[in-house]
């Protein structure tokens, strides 16, 4: 995170500095060619800044560059001043309208895998780059003392494209039409029976991606409704289903076609309420993992019509945390994502090479849900290495959001890199563990787990292999009461004083093997291994078949203020 901030700050200073230096050179000296060269460098820097920070406000620099280039051009071609004046006004208009156009388009509904193209979106996404290209053309023409009218013509053509993109948006804003949008028409043709609704902070797309294969296996047409456009590319690449971005509560109306019956959710995001207001749908919470963390018993779950849970333990968790939800709202469907996990009850002590998966979680949004073990992770990993273990380190995707956690993770990865170079042991960490391997592949490649309180433990439980849990909240003997899943694992104390004892049990004696197998049913349901995912698929189909459709869809309750 700190490195990203430094890069953004450095490129910001470079862009501004070169723009100012170019303007001063062109306006106050006779070294036009030097000023033009500086302008080209400034344009290149501005282009790099757009790549590093797409949300950067690039207005002052292009205006300054335009002014300097026009002064330098006029000095080299005095007869073209009127042409240059018109060119400058047109460029100024493009520079000033680029950001408002991007913001306006950002409020428009967009889609993928639906066959609907948005020309305003295409133009708005390229207008900034087009302005920079025009500045390069202006600099090159000035340096070569070429006529100015080709630059003016190119600027007017780009301006016409921008006006063409802005016009339909302005028309919809000023004179709303009752006619259906292209997205709505395409969705009516698609006839989706359910939608997957998703809103989350950046880096959270794993929450929706884990469910896409199973939603596709339901065998019914569906759509994915996103609220943040940043997820569009990655989510649409992971499914053939239509993906629609609805940035405002009002734009969700465009996706609510009459064929829809059910809405699935994978988290408790605040924007869920923007979709739950549609009373004709059955709203079902899927979650994006099952763990004993406090957020897994979120009272907000009560607003959903149904709550799909992996096993009875999830239902008990709500009651244990004082969250009263009628029993009929729950449906035990298992955790279909574990169906590819290999069940292996071979004792770890019999393994010639012991592979341990270490999955530290993140610090959470609040201190009371900070279960992260990275502050003591280096000590843990070094002790595993001392025992000859091979380590797979897979950190939570949100780890980089906390600078301290990012530094701690980097130190642990360096320890593993050094040991791999020295001993040849095939430790896996960094991008190799986070991107090139799935969690299931990490589970199958390991023989034991060390984890913080997280959903990884529930998934690992399916394998039958042993696990240890870190007690980062320092609850001591009460830890297994608060986090019952730890009762079938080996608890590492907050001060790590029992580390050697826990590793002896984890990698050698494993006295909790039978208790762990009984816990597996409570947490993951009692479904046959050969058709484990059918628990979810069958219940999802029952919800779709048992929901009454009311064509046309009733008008929703008023959208909340975004």
Image: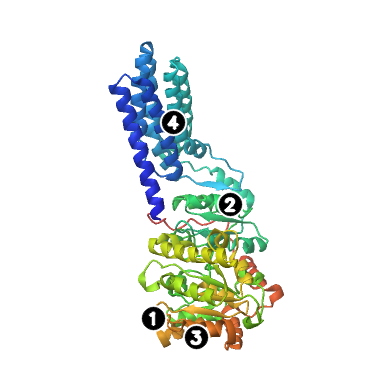
Q: Earlier in the sequence, mark 4 or mark 2?
A: 4
Q: Residue furthest left?
A: 28
What kind of element bears circle 4?
A: helix
Quadrant housing the C terminus: bottom left
Whether residue 243 is situated above or below residue 410 in the rendered picture: above
Residue visible at 47% across and 37% down in the picture: 124
* Residue placed under numbered mark 4 in the picture: 131
Question: What percent of the width, then of the height, locates residue 304?
Answer: 49, 69
Spatial separation of the CA atoms under disc 1 and disc 4: 57 Å
What kind of element bears circle 1?
A: loop
Q: Nearer the viewer, residue 405 or 124?
A: 405
Quarter of the figure with residue 48: top left
Residue visible at 49% across and 43% down in the picture: 178
Q: Nearer the viewer, residue 215 or 477?
A: 477
Residue 501's disc number: 3
* Residue placed under numbered mark 2 in the picture: 236
Res. 562 visible in picture: no
Of marks 4 and 2, the one in the foreground = 4
Quarter of the figure with residue 135: top left
């Amino acid at each position: 995170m700190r490195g990203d901030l430094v890069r953004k700050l450095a490129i910001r200073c470079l862009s501004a500095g070169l723009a100012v230096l170019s303007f001063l050179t062109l306006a106050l000296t006779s070294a036009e060619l030097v000023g033009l060269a500086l302008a080209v460098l400034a344009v290149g820097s501005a282009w790099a800044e757009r790549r590093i920070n797409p949300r950067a406000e690039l207005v002052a620099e292009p205006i300054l560059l335009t002014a300097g280039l026009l002064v330098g051009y006029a000095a080299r071609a005095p007869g073209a001043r009127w042409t240059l004046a018109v060119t400058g006004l047109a460029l100024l208009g493009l520079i000033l309208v680029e950001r408002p156009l991007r913001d306006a388009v950002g409020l428009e509904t967009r889609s993928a895998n639906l066959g609907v193209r948005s020309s305003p979106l295409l133009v708005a996404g390229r207008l900034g780059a087009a302005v920079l290209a025009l500045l390069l053309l202006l600099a090159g023409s000035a340096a070569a003392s070429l006529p100015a009218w080709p630059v003016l013509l190119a600027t007017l053509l780009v301006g016409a494209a921008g006006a063409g993109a802005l016009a339909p948006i302005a028309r919809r804003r000023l004179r709303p039409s009752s006619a259906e949008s292209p997205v709505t028409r395409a969705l009516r043709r698609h006839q989706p029976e359910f939608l997957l609704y998703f809103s989350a902070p950046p880096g959270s797309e794993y929450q929706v991606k884990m469910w896409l294969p199973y939603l596709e296996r339901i065998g019914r047409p569906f759509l994915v409704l996103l609220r943040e456009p940043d997820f569009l590319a990655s989510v649409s690449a992971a499914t053939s289903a239509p993906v629609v971005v609805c940035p405002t509560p009002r734009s969700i109306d465009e996706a609510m076609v009459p064929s829809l019956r059910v809405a699935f959710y994978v988290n408790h995001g605040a924007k869920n309420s923007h979709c739950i207001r549609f009373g004709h749908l059955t709203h079902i919470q899927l979650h994006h993992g099952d763990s004993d963390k406090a957020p897994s018993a979120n009272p907000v779950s009560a607003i959903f019509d149904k709550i799909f849970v992996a096993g009875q333990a999830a239902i008990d968790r709500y009651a244990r945390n004082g969250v009263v939800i009628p029993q009929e709202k729950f449906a035990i469907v298992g955790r279909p994502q574990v169906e590819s996990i290999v069940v292996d009850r071979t004792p770890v002590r019999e393994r010639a090479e012991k592979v341990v998966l270490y999955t530290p979680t993140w610090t959470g949004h609040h201190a009371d849900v900070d279960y992260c073990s990275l502050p003591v992770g280096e000590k843990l990993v070094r002790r595993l290495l001392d025992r000859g273990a091979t380590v797979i380190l897979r950190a939570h995707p949100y780890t980089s959001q906390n600078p301290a956690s990012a530094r701690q993770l980097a130190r642990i990865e360096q320890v593993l890199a050094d040991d791999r170079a020295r001993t040849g042991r095939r430790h896996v960490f960094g991008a190799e563990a986070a991107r090139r391997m799935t969690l299931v592949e990490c589970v199958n490649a390991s023989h034991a787990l060390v984890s913080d309180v997280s959903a990884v433990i529930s998934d690992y439980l399916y394998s039958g292999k042993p696990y240890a849990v870190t007690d980062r909240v320092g609850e001591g003997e009460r830890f297994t009461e608060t986090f019952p899943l730890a009762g079938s694992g080996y608890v590492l104390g907050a001060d790590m004083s029992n580390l050697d004892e826990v590793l002896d049990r984890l990698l050698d004696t494993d006295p909790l093997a039978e208790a762990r197998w009984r816990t597996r049913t409570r947490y993951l349901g009692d479904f046959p291994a050969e058709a484990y995912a059918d628990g979810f698929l069958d219940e999802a189909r029952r919800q779709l078949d048992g929901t009454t459709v009311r064509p046309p869809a009733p008008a929703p309750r008023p959208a909340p203020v975004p």
